[in-house]
Image: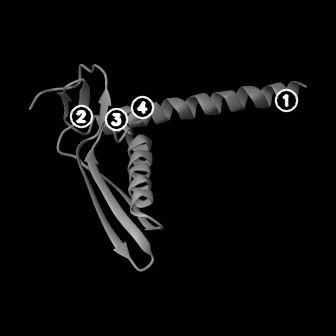
Amino acid sequence: MLRLLQTMVVATFVVTSATQALAQRDRALVGLHDLRREGPSICIVNHFHLGTASQQPTRRAAQRAAMRDWSAFTAWEYGGHWGDPRRARNKSMACERQRTGWTCDFNARPCKVGRSRRARRR
């Protein structure tokens, strides 16, 4: 029983440390970019992310998959609140039909809702 308790305490410490490290990483990576308030959002200035999808059966499926790809990478890099493609700015979607299906690229600047003292005008 004591061994199980010790294992649980260590596991809790590891998970807590990892979560804190990820949160610090997210803040640190966002801090590499200039931020600007754009309406109700805080946006990264002059930095775009690309989401891609290929071999999709329809154009709509490829568009959705490209946005999911953009969202997943952006959320991983900066935190979940940055990964909403509806909030993104300067969005573009380029699609092409190929023999193997539809391919799309979604390109946009990440934004999040909220207040931030770190946002600065350029």
Please give the residue where the numbered disc 3 appears in the rendered image. 28
Quadrant of res 99 = bottom left
Q: CA distance from mark 4 to mark 1?
A: 30 Å
Q: CA distance from mark 2 to mark 1?
A: 46 Å
Q: Nearer the viewer, residue 67 or 42?
A: 67
Which of the two marks, 2 or 4, is nearer to us in this view?
A: 2
Amino acid tagged 3: Ala
Hey, which residue is sitting farthest bottom in the picture? Answer: 99
- 107 is higher (above) or lower (below) than 43: below
Lower sequence index among marks 2 and 1? 1
Tags 4 and 3 in contact by the CB under 8 Å rule?
yes
Could you say which disc has been placed on residue 4 in the image? 1
Please give the residue where the numbered disc 4 appears in the rendered image. 24
Q: CA distance from mark 3 to mark 2?
A: 15 Å
Please give the residue where the numbered disc 2 appears in the rendered image. 43
Q: Position of residue 100 (x, y in %)?
A: 45, 77
Q: Nearer the viewer, residue 62 or 1?
A: 62
Lower sequence index among marks 3 and 2? 3
Q: CA distance from mark 4 to mark 3?
A: 6 Å
Hey, which residue is sitting farthest right in the picture? Answer: 1
Q: CA distance from mark 2 to mark 4?
A: 19 Å
The secondary element bearing badge 3 is classed as helix
Q: Nearer the viewer, residue 85 or 21?
A: 85
- 84 is higher (above) or lower (below) than 107: above
Amino acid tagged 4: Gln
The secondary element bearing badge 2 is classed as strand
Lower sequence index among marks 2 and 4? 4
Amino acid tagged 2: Cys
- 84 is higher (above) or lower (below) than 41: below
Amino acid tagged 1: Leu
